[in-house]
Amino acid sequence: MHDWWDRVVGWAVRRPRTVVAAAAVFLLACAPLAGQLNDRVVPGGLLDPNSGAVTARAILADDFHVTGNTMVAVVESDGPVDAAADRAAANAKEVSGISGVTTYRNNPRLMSDDGRRALLEINCEGAAAISTVKDLRSALADDLPSGARVRVTGEAALNSDYNEQAAKDAAFAEAIAIPVLIVLLLAVFRSVVAMLIPIGIGVATLLAAQAVGTLLSRFTDVSNLFVSAVSIIGLAVSVDYSLFILRRYTQERDRGRSAEHALATACRTTGRSVAFGGVVVLVSLAALFLPGVMVMDSIAVGGISATVFALLQSMLLLPALLTLFGDKVYARNRYLARLPGFAPGRGSRGWREGMARRSPVAGLVAVAALAALAVPIVAARLQVPVAGPSSLPANAESRVAAGQLVEFGFPVEQPVEVVFRADRSVSPGSLIDTVNQVRDRLAGRDDVESAARVGGPDGSAAPASSAAVDWIRVVPKAGSSASAQHELVADIKREGERLAPGISMYAAGVAVDGYDFDQVLGAAAPVVVAAVLLLSLLLLYWVFRSWLMALCAVVLNNVVIGATVGIVILVYQQGLDKPVSTMTPVLIFAVMFGMSMDYMIVMATRMREEFRASGDHLDAITKGTVATTPVITVAAAVMATVFLSFLVAKIEIVGQLGFGLATAVVLDAAVLRVLVVPAVLRLAGPRVWGLPRARTSTLRWSVPLDMASKGR
């Protein structure tokens, strides 16, 4: 590992122009692909591929010819709507991918009583792609009479608005985070060049990871949460990794080292620690593949792609840039040098030394406090929100149009489609009797608005192509909460368990998808946690050569994550009276476990350096704490800035995740690294530093001093 690392970094230092030119060409190729991502991702992704909902959708498509490819346009006017509706219908028929349009002239029920609103039922060929929605909206609004307006809703339109909102959330969050990061980095380095390098690497990471998402979308569905995962994780890790290495480089320069020596030391020590920490991040994110659900797969791929590109740039591009820029990276701007910043003074250094040397009682008290913060977990009510128009901002076009449909008798809540299939041993009459009994029981519930047979073998409204199938549409009571709809789905599934032999029942709908997802993720969560803990323990032993250090790192990480989840539940569930998404704790664990381990590896590696130099256990802890906590504090500020910027997101899970990750970072940097880690390592004794390695690697490359000084 060491020889391989030395060769890669050494090659980048010897050929900096080649590395920078290759990176520039690569990013130019990525840019157009990254620009296509928002049009190619899809919302949702909660569907369990092994669930009954898949069978229900297949029956609806094959036997009832219901594919969900219909959109509805609401045309309204200040006066009679006839001319506007006719114009919009004619426009819709000209759009590629539209197979037919039904208007009030075919179905009088599509006209409102006052004649000022009309609906267009628009059928699409195959799956209604998001590009079709955009083309349709543009065409419908073309050449409308004065005072007329048109809005489109339906599954495809909702999907389009979800994607647009996800893109807006990510762009808005990045627009907040990047300027704040610029200020933070200027305060740390007092150098414009040193500030621009991490920011540039962060932007490059986003472009490259987004390009991966576009390429992947050509082969499989990619959730729109891929966009958020890339922004949250990519910006945080890329800037943090660059910050760690740059900070060690400037520290070495502050000691009077040459640019060559400073770069070698930074890459050999902090650079290698960053690489190990990045591997732990990758392991944690890879565990998200275990549930086998598309949305979790997309988040995993987004996070892994961003982390891989961040690591590659810290190994190749960053050393190359430091070689090319030379002393310009270290040169402080004379105006910035006058500003207050993060440069530690004697007072703060003395305080950190005191905290590291004092009795470990304070650290143990902090552990108890963190454990107490995790108590709300026992009262957690985790569930993914029911996807629907209400999940979008109030002014979203598809949500406004969905609300207008109520006037025409459409339900407020998304229905649950319940389908039945009988084998040859069941007569059509027996199937009808069973279906009617289930319908009557469901219709009598207080949480159900209506339950009606939509189609079946008796030739009702949507006749089936087979006498062996039937269909009930169950509409939840208007204003039902996500928990109430999930309970309804659970009871519907229990109805299916009581049916006579030979009859099977399946349910589909957004509430069903959410319920099934909760069950899958709930069952997979312990496996995800166990896999991450086991693999991380093995990796950390490989890094530290100490089971005790590896165990301490894993346990302390879990203490912070537990406290974080407890705070999220306390704030959202008990404070704001909002359900916490089932994904939130799992994602906080997977994302934060690896990122927090970066801090542990950087801190413990520096302590071990000091221990090998002096042999004094307490002195090593003190010096390591003093040397690393300032940069960890700045790195935590960087991460917290990125995470908190996503509180502006309109998609609830993204806002919850941003708050949770920011909370975890603050607890980690302000409590764990300052109070708990020094106390625990002090109690563990010198044996925590583990076995010595057979050899200590040194970087086997050299940069001519004139090249470093001239910035060639």
Image (cartoon, rainbow, N blue to C red):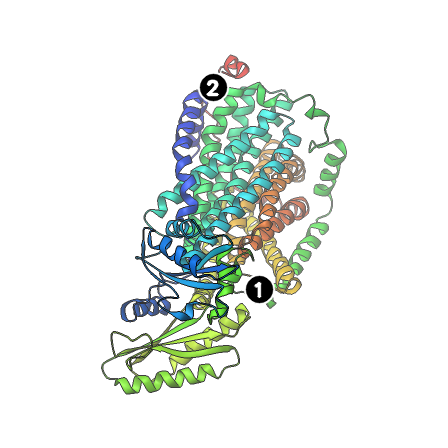
Q: Is residue 547 visible?
A: no
Where is 530 relative to 406, above or below?
A: above
Residue most toward the right? 347
In terms of depth relative to the viewer, which is nearer, 530 or 692? 530
Q: Is residue 416 visible?
A: yes
Quadrant of the snapshot with the N terminus: top left
In terms of depth relative to the viewer, which is nearer, 98 or 698? 98
Task: Answer with left or right where residue 577 lies relative to residue 464.
Answer: right
Which mark is on residue 322? none
Q: Residue at x 56, y 20 (%)?
A: 259
| Mark found first going from the N terminus, 1 or 2 | 1
Which mark is on residue 579? 1
Check disc 2 and give the amino acid type. Answer: Ser
- Read off the residue under disc 2: 702
Percent position (x, y) of residue 105?
A: 37, 66
Percent position (x, y) of residue 626?
A: 67, 36
Task: Answer with left or right where residue 553 lies relative to residue 138.
Answer: right
Task: Answer with left or right where residue 512 lies relative to residue 615.
Answer: left
Q: CA distance from mark 1 to mark 2?
A: 57 Å
Residue most toward the top? 706
